[in-house]
Image: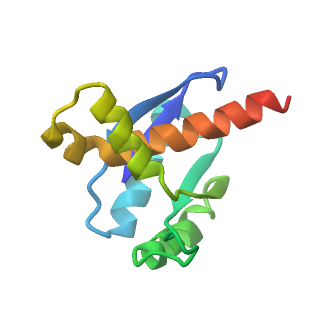
Amino acid sequence: MGIATTDANQIIARPFENFIHNKDIDALVKRISEINSENEIELILLGMPRKENNELATIAEFIDHFYKKIKKQFNVNLVDERYSTRRAKEYLKENNKSEEYIKKNKDMYAAYILLSDYLISKNNNF
C-alpha cells in the first residue's frame, strides 16, 4: 500500500513509503498507528479501487474491511483512485525512473498523486 504525507501547512504532498501488508489488516493498522505517533495524522485519504466501468476492483473488498477498521481510530475519506497508478507510472517514466523502480514504487507515487490532487482541491476552495 502506498503512503504519502504532507507538510504541516498541508500544501505540499510527498511520497512516504510503500508498506507491504500481504492483506494483513492488523499489520496495516499497526503501521498507520506508528506513522501517527511520529506525524499526528489528521486525515487519511483511502483510495477505493474501481475499474474503468466504475465497478469495484477485486481488491476493494480488502480495502473496505480495512476502512471499517481504521475509521474507528482515524478520520478517513474514501476517494476514487481510478487512474492513480497509471498516472504514477507515467510520472515516473517521465522522470527517467527504471522499470524496477517503477514496479517497486508505483503505489507510493499513486498515493502521492491522490494526496496532491486533494490538496490542490482543498487549497483552491479556501
Q: Position of residue 89 (x, y in %)?
A: 33, 43
Please tell me how many numbered marks the rendered image carries: 0
Q: Residue at x 32, y 70 (%)?
A: 23
In the image, 34: left or right of 80?
left
Identify whether 62 is placed above or below 40. Answer: below
Specify whether 34 is left or right of 124: left
- Looking at the image, can residue 34 be seen? no
The residue that appears at 57% across and 34% down in the rendered structure is 116
Quadrant assignment for the N terminus: bottom left
Is residue 44 rendered to the left or right of residue 124?
left
Q: Is residue 117 above or below residue 19?
A: above
Q: Nearer the viewer, residue 47 or 103?
A: 103
Residues 4 and 107: in front is 107
Task: Please report the residue visible at 64 percent of the width from the left and 45 percent of the height from the top.
Answer: 43
* Image point (53%, 73%), residue name: 64
Residue 77: x %, y % from top left: 66, 55
Colouring used for the render:
rainbow
- On the image, the x and y values in percent for residue 27 come to 34, 61
Front-most of residues 28 and 16? 16
**Residue 7 to residue 83: above or below:** above
On screen, residue 25 above or below 124:
below
Q: Quadrant of residue 48?
A: bottom right
Q: Is residue 14 visible?
A: yes
> In the picture, residue 71 is in which quadrant?
bottom right
| Occupied quadrant, residue 12 | top right
121 left or right, relative to 62: right
Quadrant containing the C terminus in the rendered view: top right
